[in-house]
Amino acid sequence: MEGSTLALQLKDTVRGQVFANEPMWRHTSFRIGGPADVLVVPEDISDLMTLIKSLSDLQTSFHIMGAGTNLLVKDQGIRGVVVKIASTLSHINRLGDGILRCGAGALLPSVCRNAAAMGLAGLEFAGGIPGTVGGAVAMNAAAFGGVMADLVDTAEVITYDGRQIRLDRENLDPGTKTTRILAEPLILTEVDFALRRDQPERVQERMQKYLKERTYRQPLSLPSAGCAFKNPTGKGAGRFIDAAGLKGFKVGSAEVSRLHANFIVNNGGATCEDVISLMKHVQEVVYSKFQVMLEPEVRILGG
Ligand SMILES: Cc1cc2nc3c(=O)[nH]c(=O)nc-3n(C[C@H](O)[C@H](O)[C@H](O)COP(=O)(O)OP(=O)(O)OC[C@H]3O[C@@H](n4cnc5c(N)ncnc54)[C@H](O)[C@@H]3O)c2cc1C
């Protein structure tokens, strides 16, 4: 079904925002990506449930996204519906016993600032990860030795056929930058984090230290999707890319960052094709020099 026709149908059932033929570069930190047939931002959990049911009735395929900080969207765009859970389902509430309950659409920097102000420790490492709670838990985001799945007490998910389930940490099947949520896939709607009590100033101080380190380790002023490749066991992917002499290597407007070799940056007007060609080149050169096959960390969508 054509984007505008599908969008009109969904506007009849969904309370949230519905956009037809929506350029995805507007919704990704890479600033890359052609149009999605339809992009929907559901207003709340019941709106999301209604949307999933309608999409199933219409037999329309859909993709879930958060803040788009780990996505590379194809230049041809995305057929079907993109469901964006960011800045919606974004509650942050403290429950008893160090539990912080967060909606999947809450942004991590805000969650971490709130946790620090409440004197809840554990999430300091994530204060500079620009995505949502949903994206970070689904991807099992990690930094400075901290890993998201380690802090999850329970997570509420919806199956693609519309059933609501609460999973505990063991049932998330966390791996390197993946969980059961991506593998099945499932839709994450809410997470309870199990945190430790500490002095707010001490939590704040640790978080600031990590935030500062990012400013001189990562190319934060240019569009990117964070690390392009997963770290092979025992060594950072960036070390291999740097040792292969690839810092500053370009395809079109996509460039291997000179500051952090595992970041690919968009110097302005880069296409998805540029980034994919550059990633292939990096994989080939690193493999030929070190016999290590780098695996993409960025999630490629569409086409
Ligand atoms: C400057 C910069 C620094 C970064 N630093 C780090 C870092 O230190 N550590 C790190 O791990 N990552 C880092 N990242 C990558 C990225 O921020 C994280 O992976 C983040 O967790 C992705 O969240 P998101 O909401 O943007 O997800 P998206 O990019 O929108 O989606 C990522 C994946 O998660 C899935 N997903 C998103 N929300 C949900 C949901 N509610 N339910 C089910 N699936 C969902 C999507 O389908 C997709 O497969 C960085 C990125 C940038 C741009």
Image: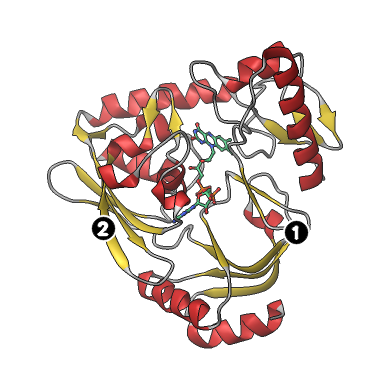
Residue 155 image point, x, y percent: 30, 52
Instruction: Quarter of the image for the C terminus: give it.
Output: bottom right
Depth check, mark 1 against mark 2: the one in front is 2
Q: Is residue 140 above or below residue 75?
A: above
Residue 192 image point, x, y percent: 26, 49
Exactly how many numbered labels are in the figure?
Answer: 2
Q: Is residue 103 above or below residue 5?
A: above
Q: Is residue 143 above or below residue 225?
A: above
Q: Quadrant of residue 3?
A: bottom right
Residue 154 image point, x, y percent: 25, 49
- At a point 44% along the width and 79% down the height, the residue shown is 53
Q: Using the numbered discs, state the Cα–Cα distance from disc 1 to disc 2 in whole angstroms.
A: 35 Å
Q: Is residue 185 above or below residue 277?
A: below
179 displayed left or right of 268: left
- At a point 39% along the width and 70% down the height, the residue shown is 44
Residue type at numbered disc 1 = Gly
- At a point 70% along the width and 48% down the height, the residue shown is 31
Q: Quadrant of residue 228?
A: top right
At mark 2, the secondary structure is strand
Is residue 165 at all visible to an observer of this figure? yes
Q: Nearer the viewer, residue 175 or 25?
A: 175
The residue wearing badge 2 is 166
16 displayed left or right of 150: right
Q: Nearer the viewer, residue 260 or 170?
A: 170
- At a point 56% along the width and 70% down the height, the residue shown is 40
Q: How many neighbours does mark 2 have within 10 angstroms: few (below 14), some (14-19), or many (20 or more)?
A: some
The residue wearing badge 1 is 34
Q: Residue furthest top?
A: 243
Residue type at numbered disc 2 = Arg
196 displayed left or right of 222: left
The numbered disc on residue 301 is: none
